[in-house]
Amino acid sequence: MKDKAREARRRLATHLRTFPVVLVVGPRQCGKTTLVRNALPRFQHLDLEKAQDLARIAADIPGFFGGNPRAVAIDEAQRLPELFAALRPVIDEKRGTGRFVLTGSASPELMRGVSESLAGRVGILELSPFTAFELQDSPQEILRHFWGGYPPALALRSSEARRDWLESYVQTFLERDLPALGLRLPAARLRILWTMLTHVHGNLLNVSDLARSLGVSAPTIQSHLDVLEQTFMIRRLPPYFVNIQKRLTKSPKVYVRDTGLLHHLAGIRTPAELETWDRRGASFEGLVIEELAGRARLADTSARAYFWGTQAGGEVDLLLVRGRKITAVEIKSGSFVDPRDLRSLRACMEDLGLTRSFVVYRGTETLKLGHGITAIPWAGGRCAKTLLAA
């Protein structure tokens, strides 16, 4: 298995040279603690999920930092929101980079105090579960699409054990993790919504339909979606448009970010069942989007992911925007690409003035399809290197 920390560690090192505080965020169990402990063995490491560590800091936060002014890493910092405000005077009193590393299982928007207290003082690194590229040439590579990327699930030896782990993950997230963030949400309703999203995975998000199905208001659904997104469970992929006068799609598309959770919540129990599922193509599409978007953000924190779509139905699955560079990517789950199916990709290129674009597919050859379009094999995420260098 490739060292998951390889790419993320480089970005962590850059942030440590730039900011007093680095915040590593990502879903629970995605490898944040492993990254930080392996990269910073000389730091003092504490975990706020451990009662003794939480009590040690919470009893006197200013006193703790007074006695430990640097080289401290604190896991699951969202469990002590007062921590962020207490860090600000410590940092301002004595400037210096690379002093503290925090990890959290929620976005800064959901972790109260980060944006207000540490603005301009914190570098943020988003970590995902294992990508396909990180698992290439390992036994887990063939498991990645169906079972997702969470390291503990992939380490298990049987399908039954992996299913049990995924179910426990869902229950713990709903019943323990969200309340620990101060969110009092009905766990049963949120699970139903999360499950409903598996059946519209890869589709345009229709909040009104979801609200009618659940018998609640659209604002309630929006707030639930905000929570799922800010805890890295779903991705709302926004549309990209630069000309507001054109008739382009304005609704986001929705994806369950980890394919293991996607399949588990949808009731797909075996890879054979996935092959006959009507969302199989969308499942592969989400896998590729997470791979490319995540790798792009690690390489360039300003990178953003979008899709392109028209109200007439034309659509391109992914646009990676890095500064003024736009990379358009169409995703095909088959092993063959028909150039006649690429009308939307050509229209997108014309609309955005692009001279090159790509199709990611499950074939084995790199193909020139004309009009500046290149088809490249998925090959366990190896396509990302070509795309990000384009």
Image: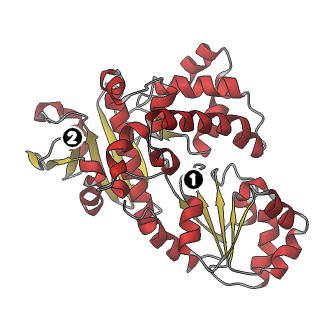
Does residue 172 appear to the left or right of 145 in the view shown?
A: right
The amino acid at mark 2 is Arg
Alpha carbons under labels 2 and 1: distance apart: 28 Å
Q: Which of the labelled discs sits on residue 229, or is there none?
A: none
Vertical placement of 134 versus 150: above or below? Answer: below
Residue 119 appears at what percent x and percent y?
Answer: 68, 66
Image quarter of the N terminus: bottom left
Residue 201 falls in image quadrant:
top left
- Residue at x 33%, y 51% (from the top left corner): 139
Mark 2 or mark 1: which comes first in sequence?
Answer: 1
Mark number displayed over residue 26: 1
* Closer-to-camera residue (317/137): 137
Q: How many marks?
A: 2
Residue with the mark numbered 2: 362
Q: Secondary structure at mark 2?
A: loop
The three-letter code of the residue at mark 1 reads Gly
State the residue in front, 172 or 196. 172
Which image quadrant is residue 276 in? top left
Residue 98 location, x and y as percent?
62, 79
Quarter of the C terminus within the rendering: bottom left
- Residue 142 place in picture, x, y as percent: 32, 44
Say above or below: 115 vs 287.
Answer: below
* Residue 241 visible somewhere in the drawing: no
Residue at x 78%, y 35% (from the top left corner): 184
Residue 109 in percent (x, y) is at 66, 51
Q: Residue at x 55, y 80 (%)?
A: 17
In the picture, measured across the screen, residue 333 lies left or right of residue 12, that is: left
Res. 98 visible in picture: yes
Mark 2: give few (<14), some (14-19) or many (20+) Cα within 10 Å: some
